[in-house]
Amino acid sequence: MARLREGFPLSNRLLREMHARLMARGRGSEKGPGEFCRSQNWIGGTRPGTAHFVPPPPHEVEDAMAALEAFLHDEADGLPLLLKAALAHVQFETIHPFLDGNGRLGRLLIALLLHQGGLLGQPLLYLSLYLKQHRPVYYELLDRVRSQGDWEAWVDFFLEGVERTALGAVQTARRLVTLFAADTRRTQAIGRGAANALRVLTALRQRPVLSLKQLCLTSAMTFPTAGKAMQHLVALGVARELTGQRRNRVFVYDAYLAILNEGGEPL
């Protein structure tokens, strides 16, 4: 999103950069991060002949992705942005240009399109939870587009997901505002030391998993002051130390993360 704000186009180059960052570690890191596939991939089954779905062969991926990029930037087609995002997601998943990580990047593409088009100022509309909750229907509708051209059913499903996710995001934001207000009042009530503890609370709101070293860098506090202020929040039950160590301690704002993580296991 920062790249888009700087004027960098939503392009295949940006998608490859994102894929390289996304796949740098963990699952799929050995499968060509940032590179379009150079060998045939498939979905389901042990080989293309038994697969549930076989995307285009590698020599066609570049042209298919170039056509998708042109579609993303075609302002003369008259399509509403939400509809364009719905169509682009299916097309990206159908091309399946990478050996791994296509689902994650295809869901990010939705948010990027809505941001680029001015509908989304912050990444507060991410459809992973909705798609996970309706996974069989999601996969079935992708297949129906590919085999029967049933775009209408997919678009209905997608738009319902946007509506539910948007409402959920608003509710989550309101709960966070309520949490922050309550924890601010509790912190103010400690009396002496409250000012520094409030500075730490503000830092945790911006970064809910935070080391003391990071806290000192971001808040311009000395290490002893930051440590003492953090201990006030630990005593209140606002923060919790994760490592159990004396050095390089890391603290987490549990209630904040609990709200953000509800149902948020990866698809």
Image: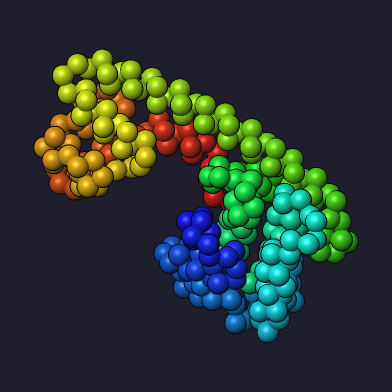
Residue farthest to the left, as pictured: 224
Q: Let me know if residue 249 appears in the view.
A: no
Q: For the point 21% across and 22% down, which residue is it?
A: 194
Nearer to us in this view, 32 or 4: 4
Q: Is residue 229 left or right of residue 180?
A: left
Q: Position of residue 117 (x, y in %)?
A: 64, 52
Q: For the point 81% across and 64% down, which residue is it?
A: 146
Dividing the picture into quadrants, the one containing residue 254 is top left
Does residue 180 sit above or below 203 in this rendering? above
Instruction: Name the colour scheme.
Output: rainbow
Q: For the point 32% across and 33% down, which residue is it?
A: 202
Does residue 249 sit above or below 109 in this rendering? above
Q: Position of residue 250 (x, y in %)?
A: 25, 43
Does residue 190 sit above or below 175 in this rendering? above
Q: Let me know if residue 49 appears in the view.
A: yes
Q: Position of residue 234 (x, y in %)?
A: 25, 28
Q: For the point 74% across and 44% down, which residue is it?
A: 159
Nearer to us in this view, 81 or 23: 81
Q: Is residue 143 left or right of residue 177?
A: right
Dividing the picture into quadrants, the one containing residue 102 is bottom right
Q: How many marks?
A: 0
Residue farthest to the bottom, as pictured: 59
Q: Position of residue 101 (x, y in %)?
A: 56, 64
